[in-house]
Amino acid sequence: MTKYKCSYCYFEITGITNLKQYKNHKCSYCDYRAPKRDHIKNPEDFLKNEDVCTSQEQKIEDALPKNHKHNLFDSSTSRNSHLTDHVNRIHLNIKNYKCNYCDYQATHRGNLNQHIKSIHLGLKQYKCNQCDYQATAKSVLTRHVNGVHLGIKKHKCTHCDYQATERSCIKKHINKVHLGLRIHKCSHCDHQALEKGHLNQHIKNVHLGIKENKCTQCDYQTTAKGDLTRHIKSVHLGIKNHKCTQCDYQATERSSLKRHINSVHLGIRNHKCNDCGHQATTKSNLKEHISSVHLGIKNHKCSHCDYKATTNSNLKKHIDSVHLSIKNHKCNRSDYQSAQKCDLKNHLNSKHFGIKHHKCSHCDYQTTESSNLKKHIDRNHKCRYCDYQVTEKSYLKNHINSVHFNI
């Protein structure tokens, strides 16, 4: 008599009759079949490695008749709890597993356990060996590695070229882009979101201004977790995966690279300052310009000294040059090195090219650096005969002629 072996566990049966009884419950919505209740209570408990079930014996799935229906059997057997559980979870989306700590509900106990571990216990057992990312489940870590480090996107949109690492992202993409669904509406403005969580995040960010995500290495705070991740990558880790094909510029985000190309190589600056006419590539850069140039606000403080900066990039440059003595910009004509690219440019203009861009508006004085021009103006033009000093050279000349020479 032919022996049949399960490809997922150690269960064995003999004869086609027993085989039919083994997997005799077929879902009325799909091709799913449920085994006997006394054989499998929880499928996860019986899953083994693939090599456990590999043998020369014919596998159960291959031997099952194609026209096998669950209505061939008595009604008491067809109402098996395992089949009912499958229909509830997959087709009816009934969530029987509820969290005792919040309103979260799940269709499967494993999902509930994972929710408790990650949200309420904060347990992240699986660590990425390429970055600091940690996950509560191995499958989540695998998706992270595939999406972030390997760039593998298995799930494709059937309507366009969009690809994603997770099926849920495809679903969101289709609902948003192709179907235009906006289910959850904000009570404070016209904003609509596909998910309630996104709406709550919108209210926190826009209407409440709550910045829950704080950097542990500096004073940076943000409303979005993704912004914090980008901040850590760019500012503290220096990870820049996106490279410009036209120059040496590198960025942590593709959007930053796009802005760089638009501003530097294409000269596109859509955001204009109403006070001075300054044009910026992004709205945030314009806001930063207004805060630093017109308002003089310095929110970024150095943790090593009393230095304050208007922008985070200026603070980083200060730390690199003053406290870390990092000088990445080297002159190809001399031994000069600088922490900032602009300093190297000034060095080349003054020492090697003799270019003096900064001119005094009161006299013929010219200099290669703005700091020298400021010192020049602050010192003013002093009279050689007395303590008189003035900002314009012509005034000094008139003073000397009238006071000292009586001309």
Image (cartoon, grey):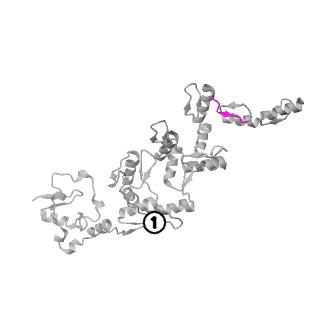
Give the vertical position of 333 relative to 217 (above or below).
Answer: above
User: Which picture quadrant has residue 2?
Assistant: bottom left
Q: Which residue is mark 1?
A: 184
Looking at the image, which is closer to me, 101 or 255?
255
Closest to the observer, 278 or 340? 278
Magenta stretch: dominant SS? loop
Q: Report the quarter where the N terminus lies.
A: bottom left
At label 1, which amino acid type do we have?
His
Q: Which residues are magenta?
A: 355-361
**Percent of width and height locating residue 141:** 39, 51
Residue located at (30% from left, 60% from top) = 44
Q: Is residue 30 visible?
A: yes
Q: Is residue 358 above or below residue 236?
A: above
Left or right of residue 80: residue 148: right
Local crowd size for mark 1, using a 10 Å CA cut-off: few (<14), some (14–19), many (≥20): some
Give the x, y percent position of residue 354: 63, 26
Which residue is more in the foreground, 299 or 179?
A: 179
Q: Residue 115 in the image: state x and y as whole percent.
A: 42, 61
358 relative to 142 in the view: left or right: right
Q: Quadrant of residue 68?
A: bottom left
Q: Residue furthest right?
A: 406
